[in-house]
Amino acid sequence: MTQFYCFLTISLLLVCILALVYRERRRCRKILEAVSAEHKLNGPEVTVLQNGYIRMRVDIVAANSFSFKSYLHIFVNVPAGKDAQSTKVTVETINEIAAALHSEGLLVGSRMGIHETDEYDEDRDIPQCVFPLDIVVNEKITPGRFVQVCNSLFKAIMDNGCNDIDHFTITGTDTGTVYKHYRGNLCIGMIQCEYGKQIVVNSYIDRPVFFGKDEQDFSASQYNELRDSIVGDGFNMSIDEAAECIRQILKHTGKGIGGNMVKAKNRLSVTISSRKSSVVLHVMYQDGLWWIYSYGNMLQLPVLSTESEADVTRMLMRVMTNFEGTHQ
């Protein structure tokens, strides 16, 4: 009888804990639902907002290991503006937004790559700079105030002119050459000339804070000329066709690696796991774009969005072939 009461007490405690966690996540979800954008991803683990060529990510994070409270973590790469002065104004405005949140008792933490505006130099190559910004707000923030914060951040960033600045690069690899087109805080186009093939990928993916050491400037006219000269590679796989291929791949993942797939209309999730690590790949169609991203410690795939179903399935299949016949 004593064991029964112990079991009942533990069960009730677990139910209460789960109820508190669910209530907190539901509260955060309601706040995120209030935010609007030109394109918006409401994923199981992440929310992405995109206006123009500026993308912002919002995660629900636990306050700490011993708390049931949840915070909202805003992350955005802030691109430099058309000149040093406009970039200074952006940084100053963002600092004012953070200061206002602090004075209202809503700010948990704020961090930006550069804080002091006097660090900027008129002779510096500002347009190529990107500054990572993190803002964490606590459970006291209301949906209306959070919407105001997001809108203010978007305005502060877009007012510096970065939404209209194009930058093109070229990178030599062991297998060929990759050309990239950047605008705002996104890479909005890529030309892959590798393995004897030429592929144009029109997608949106987060722009890195630093260019690769082998990434060099490239001219807009040469990029556009090359892009227009390339004929499609004929890849036109649908999500349904990709699902059939993935089922076969999951049957041959190799010793120590397991996986399963959940398929619904315009949505697909693939879980790959071993004894030490796991990853969930999500593909979905929302708000006019196809989205793909990963969640887990086995693979870090950034959020990619595109208007093309073929481009998102190409990325998905490229990732999945890495697990075919693999071993732990």
Image (spheres, grey):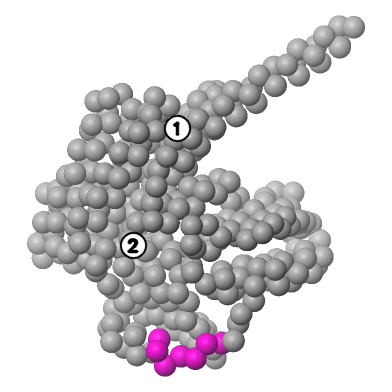
- Give the number of the disc on residue 256: none
Residues in magenta, as a range: 227-233
Using residue 256 as the reference point, say whether residue 19 is left or right of it: left
Please say whether residue 254 is one of the residues in the magenta stretch.
Answer: no
Q: Nearer the viewer, residue 74 or 178?
A: 74
Name the residue tied to disc 1. Answer: 71
Residue appearing at x 28%, y 82% in the figure: 220
Check residue 230 for magenta coloring. yes
Q: Amino acid at mark 2?
A: Tyr
Residue drawn at point x = 57 percent, y = 26 percent? 23
Circle 2 sits on which residue? 53
Whole-percent x, y for residue 270 in the image: 69, 57
Counting residues from the start of the chain, the first of labels 2 and 1 encountered is 2
Residue 126 in sight from this viewpoint? no
Residue 279 coordinates in the image, percent (x, y) = 64, 53
Vertical relation: 36 (above or below) 287: above
Q: Report whether 65 appears left or right of 83.
A: right
Q: CA distance from mark 2 to mark 1?
A: 26 Å
Label 1, residues with CA under 10 Å away: few <14, some 14-19, many ≥20: many
